[in-house]
Amino acid sequence: MNQNEIAVSMKIPELKCVESRTENKRFHYSRFTLSPLRKGQANTIGSAIRRVLLGEVEGTCITRAKFHNISNEYSVIIGIEESIHEILMNLKEIVLRSDAYGIREGSIHVVGPKKVTAQDIMLPPSVRIIDTTQHIANINKSITLDISLQIEKGRGYIIQNPNNYNPKDEIFAIDAAFVFPIDAAFAPVQNVNYSIHSYWSENETQEILFLEIWTNGGLAPKEALYEASRNLIDFFLPFLNAKEENSDGTNSLSDDITPSLPILHISTDTKRIAFDQMYIDQLNFSTRVYNCLKKANINTVSDLLNYSREDLMKIKHLGEQSVKEILEFIRNIQIDSPGNPV
């Protein structure tokens, strides 16, 4: 049996969501199955996707809080039950969702007496709060609580080191305002578990991968799985496009040999799926091109492929040279689209 016959005889694995529940706004759970898989494949996929889900999926956190007339984080404001440190810990627990990259700003301006919750945070349109009932502070007198917040989107964890931090060193710490860093746990995925079920089918051992995902509501488990899968594809694109060069500068994989490699039989479709799902900020576009595309609400390669040369030329501040840069990118990844034939 040749390679093509093997590919035809294999069943394409199918992903199914077999269970999904939301116990509260900050607890989302889903269980997925992927099958059929050959022996050993389930563990390879499960281990890789678990690591990416826990470490590479992006989330949004409050990373700075600026108070006025405060000397240190253990200070107490008369009329507020919580210390500054306790307020910072409460801000750390707030779960946010943002569709925009870069630093965003929020604020709290509340006059007491009042119970201050996450609902009292004023945010830009690109950021929203998952659980607006989360407690921040109790004001029991007629005083004002005024806090400026810095919000960032990132991945993993940032542990602030107070020994190396001086609030007055911050660029935006002015007058009597002190800025305090907040440890950031960006990861929206709280836990991942996978298990494998083996069974005998068609004269061979096959496997089913069971994948359980818990999130804090910043992303739904299905969204987190999609992002993790996209990231995993991005990791392997350099291998997919790699060519080994000889010492004389020529490629050791000649044109007549390359098409016979099994991985290259699926390279075109794989590259299309991978690039379609990529965001434009993951590409090597110049700053000018990136800013123009973002202002035109072009966020992914899939969005970009809907634009013809004429459509791109109509985008404000996107000149002919920039359009050539975009079209060259499309030609390099060898993706054909109705709007941009290459």
Image: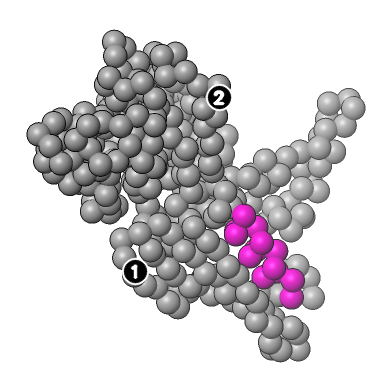
- Residue 20's x, y, as percent? 39, 73
Secondary structure of the magenta portion, mostly? Answer: helix
Residue matched to label 1: 22
Residue 246 versus residue 270 in the image, above or below: above
Which of the labelled discs sits on residue 172, or is there none?
A: none
In the structure shown, which secondary structural element does the residue marked by tag 1 occupy?
strand
Label 2 is placed on what type of residue?
Asn
Graded by Cα atoms within 10 Å as few (under 14), some (14 to 19) or many (20 or more), the crowding at tag 2 reads few
- Report the residue at 74% width, 83% height from top: 205
Is 114 or 203 nearer to us in this picture? 114
Residue 342 versus residue 225 in the image, above or below: above
| Magenta-drawn segment | 39-51
Graded by Cα atoms within 10 Å as few (under 14), some (14 to 19) or many (20 or more), the crowding at tag 1 reads some
Is 275 or 225 nearer to us in this picture? 225
Q: Per the image, is 47 magenta?
A: yes
Image quadrant of residue 223?
Answer: bottom left
- Report the residue at 65% width, 81% height from top: 197
- Report the residue at 46% width, 44% height from top: 186
Label 1 is placed on what type of residue?
Thr
